[in-house]
Image (tube, helix red, strand yellow):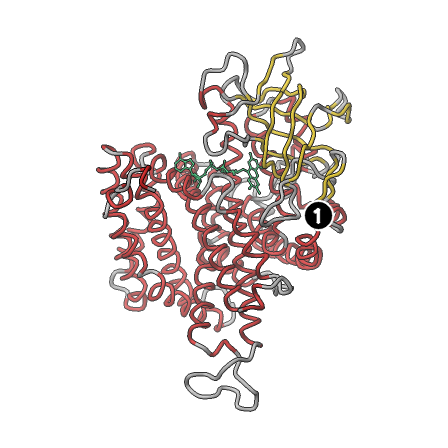
Amino acid sequence: MVTYSAPLDDLRFVLRDLHDYGGRVAALPGCEEATVDLLDAVLEEAARFCENELLPLNQPGDAAGCSLENGVVRTPDGFKEAYRAFREGGWTGLACNPEYGGQGLPKTLQFLVSEIICSTNLSFGVYPGLSHGAYHLLERCASDEQKATFLPNLANGTWSGTMCLTEPQCGTDLGLVRTKAEPAEDGTYKITGTKIFISAGEHDLTDNIVHLVLAKLPDAPPGIKGISLFIVPKFLVDADGGLGARNGVVCGGLEDKMGIKASATCVLNFDAAEGTLVGARHSGLRAMFTMMNMARLTVGLQGLGLAETAYQSAVAYARERLQGRALSGPAHPDKPADPIIVHPGVRGDLMTMRALTEGARALAFWVALELDRAERHPDPLERQAADDLVALLTPLVKAALTDIGFDVANLGVQIFGGHGYIRDNGMEQLVRDARIAQIYEGTNGIQALDLVGRKLVQDYGRPLRRFFHPVREFLEANQTNPELAEFVQPLAKVFGRLQRATLWLAQKGLSDPEEAGAAAGDYLRLFSHTAFAYLWARTAEVSFARADGLAPEFYDAKLATARFFMQRILPQSSGLFAAIMAGKGPTMALDAEAF
Ligand SMILES: Cc1cc2nc3c(=O)[nH]c(=O)nc-3n(C[C@H](O)[C@H](O)[C@H](O)COP(=O)(O)OP(=O)(O)OC[C@H]3O[C@@H](n4cnc5c(N)ncnc54)[C@H](O)[C@@H]3O)c2cc1C
């Protein structure tokens, strides 16, 4: 089994010291009870639950997978009981509105719990994760009646949610949706079509499943402008809120897939299923993006969670696996060989894993805090600023953190050698589980296009300035600070590269969108490098100040990891910059026929 205990100190450091949770979130209206002490309590209780209840189910769940018999999907042994305990513990409604039975706590706490769930059992996390997304969408876009019917049951976890976008011919390009919605006389709609790859589409954890389905009305304009959004519950809901007849939606198959095997990925057949329209006709995609933006952040946390588990497991293994001798002479002459952690190559892999994972956490929780500020800050200008930053950084969190999840899990296998490749130690499962996060909720390639094609140009560059300004201010404030020079100088360098690449993209991309398309992936990586460099420089500043009384070794390790990032990882940004500036020529040189 993998090694994992929730990284409580690092989470505390990131939230309290680095991002000032106490001043920036706990002080917001409606967060009076969400104090730093409560944050600690949630953290410890989430760690206890996930380590004791979810982690032991992770490997058996992977081995058993889900099963389908006569349209009924069963989750692996133990999942039902764990879900019941999760629900009864109040975890499903943590950040939901008290008006609908939730606890009304900040999103930041929800993120924190999500990271720990993803570390311990990603497949399990998919079920409440989707429900939370559905809750979020309906709270923003549904009618009062729909909210009253569905939100309390999603918040208390007795019902779960799905998002039904994908069809066999329709993945990234949602304009190709074929599922039909025919208006019925009673104001409802008859939904007919096939959706594939639907996470949590059918299972035995909840009493009802609330499908949020994209479909087209008979008079729909072509393409994405013609998509409407419908609520299609598995069981129809009576006027008194009780469960009625089974609706016309059945699971036609379970996907046999590479990872997250305990998460049911379903083919759903809708046959004149009764649905109700959410929001205006033909404006479903906009509503669905409310859910997808939230889900993209959650998927980023999946990468972070898996990276943490891979890192901890690799450290534990590298300490005990005895092979070879240290290059500087035997470190443990009394033993037949030294532990592999003495070897610089292994140490380099561990430092890479650590620097990427901790950097990912710093970025994820920066965005989490901004989400709460975007929702709750009393000043509309502050809300706007926070919202801009969340919009800008969402593709980074999704793509960079899921790439990190996969890369770090892969390094974890390498450190275990052959013992990582075989199943027993759980390391290969982390790689398999991590891979999907780079694909769903919009592939990472699509995230790069979102950043370059939409976020950079949005509102005349206003979201971009929300990132550029604090970086510039930090650089100006610290340019003569000798203690921080080793962090500030590389940050200044990569920031300069990012600015030049941005200008180049703005000029080239406008006249030739293929230039932007060819640069997008590398540009997103350069942007993430810059964001990580900024966060590591700030981490160094906070670590020198030793603000919060964590052990001195904690801060020393932070500084060492910050140095590793700046000196051994960040230099890759010059390669990314060169690749961007090479333009589309080398990429598009061959005709499609020549491949
Ligand atoms: C395990 C699992 C769970 C899933 N859960 C859900 C779910 O709950 N609900 C749901 O609706 N869907 C779900 N999906 C579907 C998932 O979101 C899609 O697989 C994903 O969006 C990509 O679509 P696709 O697979 O059709 O790939 P395609 O869209 O066919 O893309 C193939 C490749 O082409 C690239 N590409 C496509 N279009 C462009 C473009 N315009 N520009 C540049 N590159 C492009 C993509 O980046 C990708 O690399 C799930 C999938 C899996 C495997």
- The quarter of the image holding the N terminus is bottom right
Residue at the outermost front position: 594
Q: How many circles with numbers are drawn on the protein? A: 1
Q: Residue 387 location in percent, x, y?
A: 43, 38
Which residue corresponds to the image point at 53% horizontal and 64% vertical from the top-left? 413
- Depth check: 255 or 590 in front? 590
In the picture shown, does residue 266 fall above or below 75?
above
Q: Residue 85 location in percent, x, y?
A: 74, 48
Residue at the outermost top position: 185
Callout 1: CB less than 8 Å from ligand 1: no
In the picture shown, does residue 435 fall above or below 513?
below
- The quarter of the image holding the C terminus is top left
Q: Residue 103 location in percent, x, y?
A: 65, 41
The kind of secondary structure element at disc 1 is helix
471 relative to 386 in the view: left or right: left
- Depth check: 122 or 514 in front? 514
- When asked about the image quadrant of residue 389, the answer is top left
Residue at the outermost bottom position: 334
Label 1 amino acid?
Answer: Phe
Q: Residue 561 location in percent, x, y?
A: 42, 67
Which residue corresponds to the image point at 23% horizontal and 48% vertical from the top-left? 582
143 relative to 292 in the view: left or right: right
- When asked about the image quadrant of residue 274, the answer is top right
Which residue corresponds to the image point at 57% horizontal and 57% vertical from the top-left? 430
In the picture shown, does residue 298 fall above or below 561?
above
Which residue corresponds to the image point at 58% horizontal and 46% vertical from the top-left? 110
- Depth check: 242 or 119 in front? 119
- Near mark 1 (Cα within 10 A), the count class, few <14, some 14-19 or many ≥20, is some
233 relative to 536 in the view: left or right: right
The residue to which callout 1 is attached is 86
